Amino acid sequence: MDNQALCSFVFPSIVDRSPLLVAISSSGKAPVLSRILREKIEALLPTNLGRLAETASYWRHHIKTHLKTTAERRRFWERVFTGRFASLMLAGNKAEAEKALEDELRQPEKRPGEIILVGAGPGDAGLLTLRGLQALQQADVVFYDNLVTPEVRELVRRDAETICVGKSASGISVPQQEINRLLVDAAKEGKTVIRLKGGDPFIFGRGGEELQAAAEAGIPFQVVPGVTAAAGATAYAGIPLTHRDYAQSATFITGHFGAENSPLDWARLAQSGQTLAIYMGSLKAAEISAQLIANGREGDTPVAVISRGTRADQQTKTGTLQQLESLAKDAPMPALIVVGDVVQLHQQLAWYQHTSSSEAFKASVVNLA
C-alpha cells in the first residue's frame, strides 16, 4: 500500500553479500530512490565480498595469537583489506589470497606490490567491466595509453597517480621496454599498479610482454579482460561479426605489419564467408585492399571504416573493398576496418548514430557505395 500514514514498518532495499548486508531506506519517503541507490551499490560491491568476510572470520583467532594488541590487529586488517589479499579474494583466488595473508603476518614490512592489467574497452566508459572498475578503485598508480578515454580515466580512484605512457603511429611514444621498467619499479615499491590499456590488453595490446617482464621480476599480477574494439565498435555500428547468412567466422588481424613481422596469409584472408576485423589498418588500407583483391576477394566486397568506435563522435563509413583507400583516408583515429558481407547489415541495424551538434562533425554515417 503506497500510503505512508498507514505504514508502521519499512522494508529497506537490501544489498546481500552475506555475511555482509547493506540496507538502504528512505523511511518511506522515496522508495524508488532507495531501489536505484541499491542498484548502484550492487554494481560497486564485488560479488565475492562475502567470501572475503568469511575468510577473515576464519583467520581472526589465528591473528589474535600473533598480534596481541587491538591497535596491531586493526592496522593489520586495514593493510590486508586494502592489499593483495583482498584483491586476490575478490578475483576468486582463495589459495593465493590466504598465502598473501600469511606473508603479511610473517613479514609486514615486506609488503609486495602488484600489477593489474586492465582492459579499458574501446571508448564508452559504460563498457568498462565491473571487475575493471573495482581494480581502478584499488590503484596507487595508473599507467594508461592514449586510447583510454577521459571518461574511463575519470573512474580512477581520486588520490591515485596517473601517468600517460601512450604510443601512437605518429607523435611522442614511450618505448615498450621503458613501460615495462616503470611498471616493475612501481610494484617493487609496494604499490598496487594498474596498467590500463584500450580494448582488451591481450588483443594487439602487448599486454603479454608487460606481464612477462613482471613474471621475470617476480612481481605478482592479475589480468582483467576488456571489450576489444572489434567487438565493441562493430556492435555500435550495427555490424554483427558473424551471421548465418553472411559469415561463419571472424578473423582479427593487425594492419601494423612490416618487414619484421611474419607475412600474412593473404590467400586465406581473401576467402569468402568470413569477416575480417583489421586493427591499426588505416595507413595500410591501399595495400590491404590490393592484396585481398589480388588473392581472390571480389572488389565489390562490402567494407566499413569505423572511427572512434563506441564514443560520442563515432563515425562509420561504408563502401566496397576497391574503395577502401579513399574510405580510410583522413579517417579519425582510432579506426577499425571491417571487410565482409556482414557490412551490408549496417544500414538496417545501425542504432548508435550520434551526430555532434558541433559543425566540426558531419553525419556519423557516410556511404560511398
Image: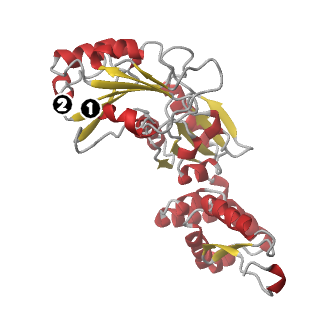
Instruction: Answer few, some or many: residues within 10 Å of disc 1's Cα (few below 14, many 20 plus, some between 14 and 19).
Output: many
Does 70 sit above or below residue 318?
Answer: below
Q: Position of residue 255 (x, y in %)?
A: 35, 22
Q: Quadrant of the N terminus?
A: bottom right
Q: Position of residue 323 (x, y in %)?
A: 32, 14
Evaluate if marks 2 and 1 touch, with contact meaning CB atoms under 8 Å apart. Answer: yes
The foreground one among 307 and 59 is 307
Q: How many marks?
A: 2
Q: Earlier in the sequence, mark 2 or mark 1?
A: 2
Identify the amino acid type marked 2.
Answer: Ser
Q: Position of residue 126 (x, y in %)?
A: 57, 46
Instruction: Answer few, some or many: residues within 10 Å of disc 2's Cα (few below 14, many 20 plus, some between 14 and 19).
Output: some
Cα distance between the residues tagged 2 and 1: 9 Å
Identify the amino acid type marked 1.
Answer: Asp
State the residue position of label 2. Answer: 272
**Image quadrant of residue 250?**
top left
